[in-house]
Amino acid sequence: MDLFDKCAGFFSDPAVAQAIGYATNPRTAQAMGLYPFFIALDQTEGTEVVIAGKRLIMIGSNNYLGLTTHPKVRQAAIDAIREYGTSCTGSRFLNGTLVLHQQLEEQLADYVGMEKALVFSTGYQTNLGTISALIGRGDVVVIDKEDHASIVDGCRLALGQMKRYRHNELDDLDRVLAGCPPDAGKLVVVDGVFSMGGDIAPLPDIIPICKKHGARLMVDDAHSLGVLGGGRGTAAHFGVTADVDLIMGTFSKSFASIGGFIAGSEPVIHWIQHFGRSLMFSASLPAPNVAAVLAALQIMKAEPERVQRVNEIGERMRREYRRLGFKIGASETPIIPIVIGDQMDAIMAWKALLEAGVYCNVALPPAVPEGQSLLRTSYMATHTDEQMDCVLEVFAKVGRTLGLIS
Ligand SMILES: Cc1ncc(COP(=O)(O)O)c(C=O)c1O
């Protein structure tokens, strides 16, 4: 069989697509207008986007504080291009470290309450480089079953063993850790806020279990920075920063840019600097992206009302969706899943919302377990109450029409 046969089959033959968990093949879905991925935006102004000439309310971004269009963030990126150009053309390890990267690292370490931070070019690369640098042969990394794909991929790249425990079930975490060789180095990695469910990792309960088994703890705060703990993340939210070993963050969400960082104690960050392959063998974050993060961080510190606002909107939307009869799982944050179940039902709901002027994301297997397809909605500090009224009205109408609610 030719290596590429599966590729052609995936696009043209529903049986091939179904065999790997897709309801149908993407080309058929595209022809029916039911393909929810790679949708191109003509314009994006934060809370509203234009798709194929039609204006929609955006509830599918990770722009929690609405800073991607903030004048100071835009200006910082423009000024940095003028000063440094568009690329560092090399890795942090060699010619790609600017004083700007070091300034950002100092400010981030201080912001999340750690000794030192290290900036990578994406959040994905941060998890890849951190986990693979730390988990050597004989070590074990233990992760929550709903951790982000970049954590799973970091574990796959590592030479040590990966084990998983049931989502937020701490008896299971205890059981998995108890089953690890006692003399193995152990790292537990959790999402601070889970990216699909919007629920929070219960760090105050996880920490004693890690301590009991001599495991280190890393928290992926991609969706927590700018949202929890006054913006400083999950450990700050629970007041347990001193008991967390590593905090990871991305710049592609509240920080209005792209990139990521890991923060922890000086020797551990120094080790990752020298063994994190995704840092050493990939070009560094360009100056405009670094400058945008620095500007966003200033605003996050100076305007705590943004953090408060996004949480207020999240609270209101959770309350209203529940009142309407939608299933929103265990969400506690401005990420609110609308759990539909069947793949095609979820796609039909996404399409109906799009036609009615609301953009959200769809999560289908394998991104979510079979039978738990959902609409992922998420909110921004800059959304207006009127926009939220409109979203709720559209959801109520679409939900009733499709029989999702009564
Ligand atoms: C929990 C989590 N970690 C890591 C990442 C990767 O971050 P980035 O998109 O900045 O590479 C994401 C992105 O979606 C995420 O949700």
Image (cartoon, rainbow, N blue to C red):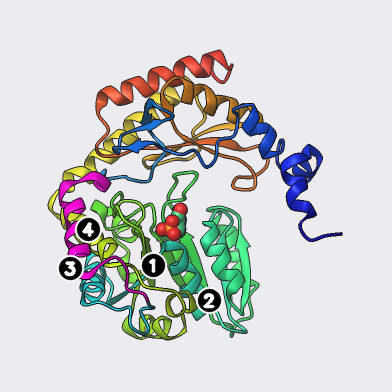
The residue drawn where x is 37% and y is 64% is 260
Q: Determine the CA span between mark 1 and mark 4.
A: 16 Å
Asked if the beta carbon under badge 3 is closer than 8 A to the nearest atom of ligand 1, the reply is no
- Kindly indicate whether the residue at mark 2 contacts the one at mark 4 (C-beta within 8 angstroms): no
Q: Position of residue 108 (x, y in %)?
A: 25, 67
Q: Position of residue 339 (x, y in %)?
A: 55, 33
Above-or-below relation of 104 to 336: below
Q: Which amino acid does the dot numbered 4 rest on?
A: Ala
Left or right: where does residue 69 sit relative to residue 249? Answer: left
Q: Which amino acid does the dot numbered 2 rest on?
A: Ser
Point out the frontmost of discs 1 and 4: 4
Q: Considering only order in the chain, which callout, 4 or 1, is on the residue closer to the N terminus? A: 4
Q: Determine the CA span between mark 1 and mark 2.
A: 16 Å
Point out the frontmost of discs 4 and 2: 4
**Mark 1: few/some/many CA within 10 Å (<14, 14-19, 20+):** many
Q: Position of residue 319 (x, y in %)?
A: 38, 28
User: Which stretch did the figure color magenta?
Assistant: 67-89
Of 177 and 284, the residue lying toward us: 284
Above-or-below relation of 96 to 70: below
Above-or-below relation of 357 to 41: above
Q: Is residue 272 visible?
A: yes
Figure quadrant of residue 348: top right
- Kindly indicate whether the residue at mark 3 contacts the one at mark 4 (C-beta within 8 angstroms): no
Point out the frontmost of discs 3 and 1: 3
**Mark 4: few/some/many CA within 10 Å (<14, 14-19, 20+):** many
Name the residue beneath numbered marker 3: 83
The residue drawn where x is 27% and y is 54% is 229
Left or right: where does residue 326 sit relative to residue 140? Answer: left
Label disc, if present, on residue 132 of the rendered structure: 2
Element at label 4: helix
Label disc, if present, on residue 349 of the rendered structure: none
Q: Determine the CA span between mark 4 and mark 2.
A: 31 Å
